[in-house]
Amino acid sequence: MAIIESPTARAASPLAAFGARPEIQGPGMAALVAWVEEIAALTRPDRIHWVDGSPEENEALLTQMVADGTLIPLNHDKRPGSYLARSDEGDVARLESRTFICSEKQEDAGPTNNWAEPAEMRATLRPLFEGSMRGRTMFVVPFSMGKIGGPISQLGVQITDSPYAVASIGIMTRVGIAVTERIAQGAPWVRTVHSVGAPLRAGDEDVAWPSNDEKYIVHFPDTLEVWSFGSGYGGNAILAKKCYALRIASVLGRDQGWLAEHMLLIRVIDPQGRAYHAAAAFPSACGKTNLAMLRPTIPGWRVETLGDDITWIRPGEDGRLYAINPEAGFFGVAPGTGEATNVTAVETLWGNVLFTNVALTDDGDVWWEGLTEEPPAHLIDWRGEDWTPDAGRPAAHPNSRFTVSASQAPSIADDWEEAVPLDVILFGGRRATNVPLVVEAFDWEHGVFLGSNISSERTAAAEGKVGELRRDPFAMMPFCGYNMADYFAHWLEMGDLASELPKVYQVNWFRRGSDGRFLWPGFGDNSRVIDWIIRRLQGEAEAVVTPIGLVPAPRSLNLDGIDVSRQDLDELFAIDVDAWLEEADLTEEFYDLFGERTPAELRVQLQELRTRLQTARD
C-alpha cells in the first residue's frame, strides 16, 4: 500500500533517521504488518514510523516536539531532560461520558458502563478516522505491560499520530524491537488505535496541541481492541494505561483466571527485616500515591514502591496470589504533591519528566499548587498567561500531570519488575463518617463484600451526616471492562483458585469528628495502620470483633510520637448502628442495580451484616 510521503518535511525532521519497518521474520509479523497497512489505508498518514524504542529515537522525538511548539524545554540545571506541554483547554482530563464498552451484548457491559452496539459504533468511528492522519506521521508503537517476557506480562501495539502519546508510552511501558520480535514469533497482542483527529491539508498551519471537539474512547472487549479519537490528553491517548491495563485486561483476567486492578503495590519491611506485600485500591483523591511512596514515621519500618496505580494478580503454582505492576512509569496528578505531603514523589521528579499543564517559573522550572507552601511571586500559568498569587485562579490545572519513569523513585524496590506474593489487600475510600480507620474482613467473601461497597461521601457528608455515597467498588467503577456484578463474581471465584489467600482490610484516613476535624493525621502516620495489619499477620496484634469486621483492640495501635487523644481514637472506631443499617439499605439499592447478576454470596453477606447490626442494637 502506498503512503503519501512529504520528502521535504521528512528530511527536516530529527526523526528522519528512524522509523523503518523492522526486518523481522516470524508467523505473527504478517498479521501485524497487514493491520498497520489497514489502519494506514483508513487514516491516510504522510508517513509511517515504526518505533524502535531507542534513546536516540526518543531524543529525536522530543527535539521535534520542541520545534513544533508542543514541548517547552525546562531549565537543564534545575530539571534536566524535562519538558512542559500545554494542552488545549478542552482536552485536560479523562472523559468518562465519552468512554464506551462495546460488548456484543449490552448486559455484558452492565449498567455502570456506557454501552453501544459494536457494529453501530464502528460505523460511527470509521468516518471520523477516515483521513484523520493526513499531513501527519503515523507511529506504530509496540509495547509490553510488565517486563518483556515476564510470566504475567501482556503485549500490545498502539497506532497514533501524536508524538506526545509516543513519548508518554515510552515512559509508561516497555517499548521497542524486542516486543515486535515476540509478536512476530506469535505472542498474542492487543490492537489499539489513536488519532487526535486533526488532519492537515496543504497550506494548513499546525497547532501545538492538536485535538478535536468530538471525542470517543471505545473498547471492543470481544475482539480486544481500543479505538480513541479526538483527545491528546494522556488518560485518553496513552491507551496502554486505563484502556488496556484495566478495561481490556479486566476482560482478559475474567476469561483467563486472573485480576487486573486499579491498585498500588508496595513492600512493607518490619524492623526485623521481614517483608510483606500489599496491594491497595483507592478511588481518586483518597491518598493512593501517598501510600505507594509511604515514608513510615515508626522507627525501623520501611516501605518500598512496586507500583502506584495498576496491579495484575495471578494465582501461582504454590497456591498463593502473585502480583506485578504492569506499568513502567508514573502518570501522576501534580497538584497536592509536595514536600509536606509526598516528598518521595517530589524527589522522583528531579529530571527526565514530561509535565503537562503545570505552571512555568521565571527561571525555567515548574510549579503547581501544593508543591511549596508559598507560591512564587510570578509564574506563567498552564494557559501560557502571566500569573501572580492574587490572580484568583490556579496556576496549574487541577488535573495537571507528571509522567516519569518508576525507576527514578528513591523508594522503588530493586526487584520492582518481578512478581511478588500478596499478603494483604486494602480497600479505601474518602469517608467522613461511619467507616473506621481500619477494619479487617472476617474472610475472603467478606473482603469481597467490603470491596464491592467502597465509596466516598459527597459534600453533605462533611457536615457529619451520612450523605449520598459516590460508589466506586474496588476503585474500578470507571475502569471495569465488563458487567461489575460479573466482576464481583470473578473476585469470589478467585478465592477458589488459591489455597493461601491475602488478608483483606478496609481503611479510611478521612474520618472526621463531630467538630469537622480530621481525626487521623494521615500521610506518614498511616504506617501505624500498616504496622497493626502486619502484626495481625504475625499473630502479634489483638483485634475486637464488631458487626462490620475486626478492629484494633484498645492500645494495640502504635501511637508513640503522635498526638491522638483517647476521644479521637474512640470516634475513629465508633460504629453507629443506625447509620450502618441505613447504609445497608443503600447497599441493597446498589446491588439491585445489577438485578439477578449480583452474586448471591454478596446478598448473604449483606443480610449477615444486618443481623449483626440488629443484634448489636438489641
Image (tube, grey):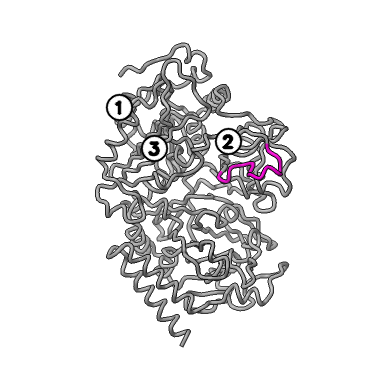
Circle 3: element type: strand
Tell me: 353 left or right of 563: left
Q: Is there any visible trace of residue 150 in the rendered image?
A: yes
Q: Where is residue 192 drawn, in percent x and y?
A: 37, 36
Mark in front: 3 vs 1: 3
CA gap, disc 3 and disc 2: 21 Å
Q: Quadrant of the N terminus?
A: top left
Identify which residue, 520 or 187, lies in the foreground: 520
Tell me, yes or no, whether the highlighted magenta stretch contains residue 391: yes
Q: Amino acid at mark 3?
A: Ser
Tell me: 263 left or right of 374: left
Q: Determine which quarter of the picture holds residue 196.
A: top left
Q: Amino acid at mark 2?
A: Leu
Instruction: Name the mark on residue 354.
Output: 2
Above or below for 119 versus 250: above
- Image point (42%, 76%), residue name: 609
Question: Few, some or many C-alpha atoms within 10 Å of disc 3 (few <14, some 14-19, many ≥20)?
Answer: many
Residue range corresponding to the magenta coloring? 387-399
Say which residue label 3 marks.
Answer: 228
Mark 1 or mark 2, which is nearer the start of the sequence? 1
- Image point (31%, 55%), residue name: 110
Identify which residue, 246 or 528, lies in the foreground: 246
Question: Few, some or many C-alpha atoms within 10 Å of disc 2 (few <14, some 14-19, many ≥20)?
Answer: many
Above or below for 320 versus 58: below
CA gap, disc 2 and disc 1: 32 Å
Q: Does the magenta stretch mainly form a helix, a strand or a loop?
A: loop
Say which residue label 1 marks.
Answer: 38
Question: Few, some or many C-alpha atoms within 10 Å of disc 1 (few <14, some 14-19, many ≥20)?
Answer: few
Query: Contact (CB < 8 A) between labels 3 and 2?
Result: no
Mark 1 or mark 3, which is nearer the start of the sequence? 1
